[in-house]
Image (cartoon, coloured by chain):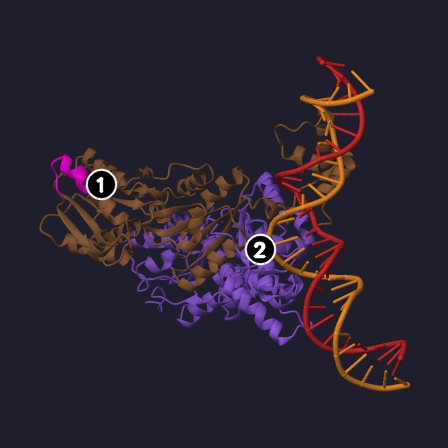
Chain colours: A brown, B purple, C red, D orange
Amino acid sequence: MGRERATLADVARRAGLSKTAASMVLNGREGTRLSAEAHQRVFAAAEELGYRPNVAARSLRTRKTATIAFVSDIVATTRFAGGLIRGALDAARERDHVLLITETQGDATFERYAIEAILDRQVDGVIYAAMATRRLAVPPAILGGSVVLLNATSPESLPCVLPDDEGAGAMVAETLLANGHRDRIALIGRNRQKERDPEISLAADARLRGIRDTLAAAGVSLLAEGFCPEWLPEHGYTAMRTLLERPTRPSAVICMNDRLAFGAYQALGEAGLTIPGDLSVISFDDDPIAAWLRPGLSTAALPHEQMGRRAVEVLLDGGDAAASFVPMPLRRRRSVAAPAD
Amino acid sequence: MGRERATLADVARRAGLSKTAASMVLNGREGTRLSAEAHQRVFAAAEELGYRPNVAARSLRTRKTATIAFVSDIVATTRFAGGLIRGALDAARERDHVLLITETQGDATFERYAIEAILDRQVDGVIYAAMATRRLAVPPAILGGSVVLLNATSPESLPCVLPDDEGAGAMVAETLLANGHRDRIALIGRNRQKERDPEISLAADARLRGIRDTLAAAGVSLLAEGFCPEWLPEHGYTAMRTLLERPTRPSAVICMNDRLAFGAYQALGEAGLTIPGDLSVISFDDDPIAAWLRPGLSTAALPHEQMGRRAVEVLLDGGDAAASFVPMPLRRRRSVAAPAD
DNA sequence: CCACGTCGCTAAACTGATTTAGCAGAGCAT
DNA sequence: ATGCTCTGCTAAATCAGTTTAGCGACGTGG
């Protein structure tokens, strides 16, 4: 690609020095006794030739590749993955690293394949990302090197980066309380499976805990809870309709994510109720749709970019081997107001 | 990572042969005169030692890295990028390649940086992707190697992969005609800038052309056209309201993308009109939201995965140096029906 | 009997960097 | 003059593969 690149030998020759000297100067080695003038000459030569080291050659010797593998379980394609990747990309660039992306699609064969590709290329570290916050099993083959889990935990208690779902739950509840809602707060999106099985979700349980604890501390308990098989709009729609059939109408609804909230909006629209006049809605994720809804949906944002960034930081700058929780900021829009009566 | 890996020398030693022999056998070189027994021994040894070649060492000699760079202009983070990446990932895996991802964010410095990182690593090829279908300038530095443009064209007439927006426009128009709509078809999302400047969008003009030509062939012309500064829900909403104020209400609306259509849905909901009873809606993109709307939105899908896949195919299997258009399949949902009267 | 070709394989060069070990010369003390 | 240290630098090994050039043994035809 491009005409021949200058090699270190070219630089050395032009500087009238040995490859050794050139290498040491360019790598800024301490404790070398090369003269200031030699430094000058090497830098000048490198500059003039547009020298860039050959990564393959370097890593053959040093076993460092300045490359991080980003392995995701399912679909690095969802919009969630996008933010994670982008954050990781930014942080990696700042540290002169590059990202190698693979996807296991939850398939054991693909996973093995991805791991081998990664090992063959001697990446400096692996970010193992899950698209839904959950616990997962990390293939032992990569445990030899450094691994950071992103949006996931593992039995091996590797360092991991997670969104602070519990804090978000608390903030959501507090927001409703602060707006004067008390005994008529309903919840949409309960799901026993998600709440109980950490291999499916860690978020469900954590959000619920944050909500419950905060309400309890204010002496409030939930008016009603709608269960949903999946966190999709259609189930939010159904749950909302069911909620509206109850004798006391809620003054506010917490949805476990924005897609459910979208469904709730649809049901409310059909019922001729207005948000937030008749009913406040608040949610989690900050899916793009939250901003598109009318009125805009207040929601605790999943800090994807921050998380991706943090993962690289922990991996490269070596952090504490513990879990690091990234706060989920509340996006305040127009869907929450004081109760009508 | 992991305990020491076996090298080719280890394999050769175990097989009782030279590195040369082992290398040739493992690479399946034709025309070598190594005995069948030698082949056996090498394969056996490699298997027993779990040998995997060191990519850095190999590429140092061969200048092949089995790595493709995926460079995107803006935010490899949008959901659009996701599909492109996933398709590319799949196709790359099938060809034993791996994807290196970088993002220029439309910033010249970042772009230079990305290009250097890529060149340093001697990737075998570059996929240069744009997130909105458009024309762009490819940095000359990578023109030395093989480049495929994804979702973009360039003045250099490099091979490129594009969605068939014109065909999609035609199909959308045909669908309405087939449902009996004729003189009351309106359009939302006209935008002079997008239509005229190929560096901003190629899709706008192509879709419009497909729609107009098809309608014209049936002797029909558009009832009304709503202009929108951006293809966002709020502008779809406004455009739809404006449309409803006209003396003759349209029987169908074509939206230039799903986000506009979402806005149109909102306006129609507020106006108490039902889809498709009072009015049909059809659109482009197949954003996830299209499936979530009630009723589901019929839309011509951007074939992201196919496009990503095709880009890798063109790059690696060497295709014709021309543009390859990927068809946009129509997702038929419930938003289109025959006009009321 | 010798020249020649084929077979089956190997030694060594090569890729482009890093790193270890060490050399020549100057300055200084003995 | 000799030995010693310090300075400023370099030769060569090394990483793990691929590739070129060629070697020894054997069979064959003249």
> Is the residue marked by circle 1 packed among few (<14), some (14-19), or many (20+) residues within 10 Å?
many
Do marks 1 and 2 share a subunit? no
Q: Which residue position holds label 1?
A: A210
Check disc 2 and give the amino acid type: Asn
Mark pair 1, 2: CA separation: 49 Å
> Mark 2 — residue?
B54
Secondary structure of the residue carrying tag 2 is: loop
The percent position of residue D29, horizontal first and vertical second, equals: 85, 86
Inspect this view and state whether residue B302 appears: no
The residue drawn where x is 36% and y is 56% is B289
Extreme-left residue of the structure: A247
Q: Which residues are magenta?
A: A212-221
Viewer-side residue, A11 vs A20: A20
User: Which chain does tag 1 point to?
Assistant: A
The answer to whether residue B27 of the structure is visible from this angle is yes
Quarter that holds the C terminus of chain B: bottom left
Q: Position of residue A102 (x, y in %)?
A: 47, 55
Q: Is A216 within the magenta? A: yes
Q: Quadrant of residue B298?
A: bottom left
Question: Badge 2: few (under 14), some or many (20 or more) residues near its Cα, within 10 Å?
Answer: some
Q: Label 1 amino acid?
A: Gly
The chain identifier of the residue carrying mark 2 reads B
Report if the CB atoms under discs 1 and 2 are less than 8 Å apart. no
Q: Residue at x 39, y 44 (%)?
A: A304
